[in-house]
Every structure is written in C-alpha cells, then in structure tokens.
Amino acid sequence: MTKTSTLTLTLFGAAIALAAALAHWPPSPASALDATLLIDVAIVGAASTALVIAARNKKSEKAAAGLWLACGALLGAAAAAPIKVALWLLPGVLAFGAAGILAGLGGARGVTWRVSLYVVAAIANFFFLWSSLVGEHAWLDPAEFAVRDFRVNEFLADVPPHDVWVFQLDGGEPGLTLADARETLASRSPLEASTIVAGLVGIRFLLGAVFRWDDDKYFDTSASYAQRLTEADRSASLTEPGTGSEMFRTIYTFENESLAEMMNRTAHAFFCMAFEPAADGYRMYWAIYVRETSRLTPFYMALIDPFRRYIVYPGIVTAVEREWAAHWGESAAPPS
C-alpha cells in the first residue's frame, strides 16, 4: 500500500465531506431532515480516515475494503442529496476511489471484490438516506380522492386514476389559493431537491427526444379533453383552455383546482392539482390519470412506475413540503 498517497487522498475525501456538511448545514428547523444526510456524510469521512490511520499503524488490514465501501457510500449519499450537495461530494467519491486503488486488492478477484463493495455500499446508503429523507410515501388511495368535491372527479369519470399524492402544507396565512401556493413554491424546482430525481427525469426526456415519443404530432387537438368543457367551466377558468407548453396543456384553472393534459406516443395523461384548507394549514393533491393510446401504454407505465412511486414522486412531495415550510416557518398561524 502506498501509505502516504493513500492517507493524503483519504484526508482529501474526508475534508470534502466535512466541507459539504459545514457549507450546507441546515439553517433552520424547516431543513432539519438535511442533517441526516450531512451527518451520514461526515461519519463516512471520519470512519475512512480512522481506518487508514489504523492501517498505517498496523492495527488493521482492512483499509482497501473500507475505502471502497466509503467510495460507494458517498456516491449513494450524493444520489440522495440535492444537486448542490452532490457537486461537493463527487470529488470526495473520486478521492476515496483512488485511495482504494492505491490501498491494494489487486488481481481479478480484487477487482470483483472492490466493485461489489462499491455497488452494495452505494445502493444501501442511498436507500437508507432516501427512507430517512422522504419519510412515508404520501400516496392516497384514489378512491378516497374520488369522493371529494372536485370538478375533476366528474370531468374525468371515464379515465381511470393512476395514483394520487398528498402534500401536507403546514402553516400559511388564511385565505390562500392554489395560485398563491404555486407562487410560494415557484422559487425552486422540486427536481433540484435530489440528484437521482433530476437524473431520472433527465433520462426520460432524453429517451423521449431520441425515440421522438414527445413529438407535437402526437397531441391531437380534436382528442383534447378541453373540448368537453361546459360553458360554465370555461367562464370559471382563470386561464384559456389549451394554453401551455408543447407537452402540457391546460384544460382548466379554477381558484383551487387545475387540470392539464399531456399526449405523446406513450400515453394520454392528465395532471390535476387541488388545494384545500386543513387543520394545520393546507393540503394539496396531485392526481394523475392515464388513458391508453396504444399497446405501448401499459408496458411503458409498468416500466416507469417503480421509479415514479418510490423515488421520483416521494422526492418531489418532500421537496415541495420542505419549500413550503421554509417559506412560512413553524410560527406561521394556520388558516382559520
């Protein structure tokens, strides 16, 4: 083992981990969940340093294995972390990986062992942090949403709900509307909250561009559900039906409810946001409906559902709730 180089790289990786923790330590109780991630990162750095120092003093022969575990653990932490934290951690990942190479474990068996440690540590630490950071999945039984007095339940009676997510928005002044909530949450994209969420969404859009799933030609205006709006719906809508981006187009926007649709090669999907007062503040619902457009739809949804339901949507829900809490703070009076 090249002791000096290994120790130098290990100390560098540990210093990066500590710097990330210090630079992004939660400034307020609203961000307290971040402490779990940053404490984890600091422990990885400290344990790795202690292991290499012990190996130098001939009190341990496990430095090489430990450094590869540290490399994987730090990568798992970077995947669970917000992008701004992940950028800090990547140099540490590289440093621990280089230190692990210098620490030994040569040959084919050594390579297999190193890669195995790396992969297991990355996956295990990611899911440990993810379960701590996102808490319970805020999934709601669609049947519970269907009995609520929202226009979408009648409007999309012929389209099966795919899933419904709930945002618990504690605090906030009385009389807020969906537009107010969107304004409050507009300062930061939920995708910034997690590297893995941003990465998965980016991969989906990349595949859409490569295979042309999202071409505008798949949006059939004549099949748009905006055609189903009644005169009362149109007069109550705060935005013009059919407006929006190429992928998502508005059907209606009421004071506390909005509905948009997306048509592409994979599905005809609808996204409803509904907003209502709750005991401790407000509650916002995100209901997703999916209508099959081809034989590809069920296969496509089955493929992406594990990522949507266990990583992407829980991450977005948690990011929105934390952004709301950071804006209003724990002292904000709940609506009457």
Image (cartoon, helix red, strand yellow):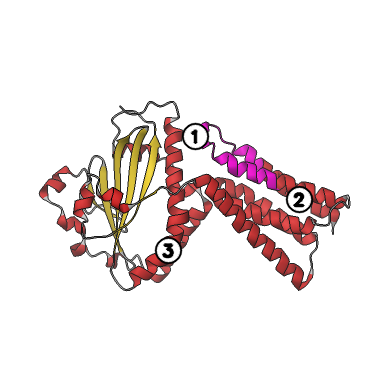
Identify the residue shown where x is 56% and y is 53%: 127
* Crowd around label 3: few <14 · some 14–19 · many ≥20 (10 Å): few
Q: Is residue 293 left or right of residue 197?
A: left
- Name the spot of residue 83 as percent of width and height, x first: 54, 49
**Disc assigned to residue 228:** none
Crowdedness near tag 1: few (<14), some (14–19) or many (≥20) residues, C-alpha within 10 Å: some
Tell me if residue 192 can be seen: yes
In the figure, is residue 9 to the left or right of 209?
right
Tag of residue 304 = 3
Is 314 inside the magenta-drawn segment? no
Residue on which the image places disc 1: 30
Which residue occupies the foreground of this view, 283 or 100?
283
Mark 2 to mark 1 CA distance (whole Å): 33 Å
Q: Is residue 176 above or below residue 110?
A: above
The part of the chain drawn in magenta is 19-44
Quarter holding the C terminus?
top left
Quick one: label 2 or label 1, which is nearer the N terminus? 2
The label nearer to you, 2 versus 1, is 1
Mark closer to the chain start, 3 or 2: 2
The N terminus appears in which quarter of the rendering? bottom right
User: In the rendered image, which residue does mark 2 sit on?
Assistant: 10
Farthest residue to the right: give it.
Answer: 58
In the picture shown, does residue 192 fall above or below 301?
A: above
Identify which amino acid the numbered label 1 is placed on: Ala
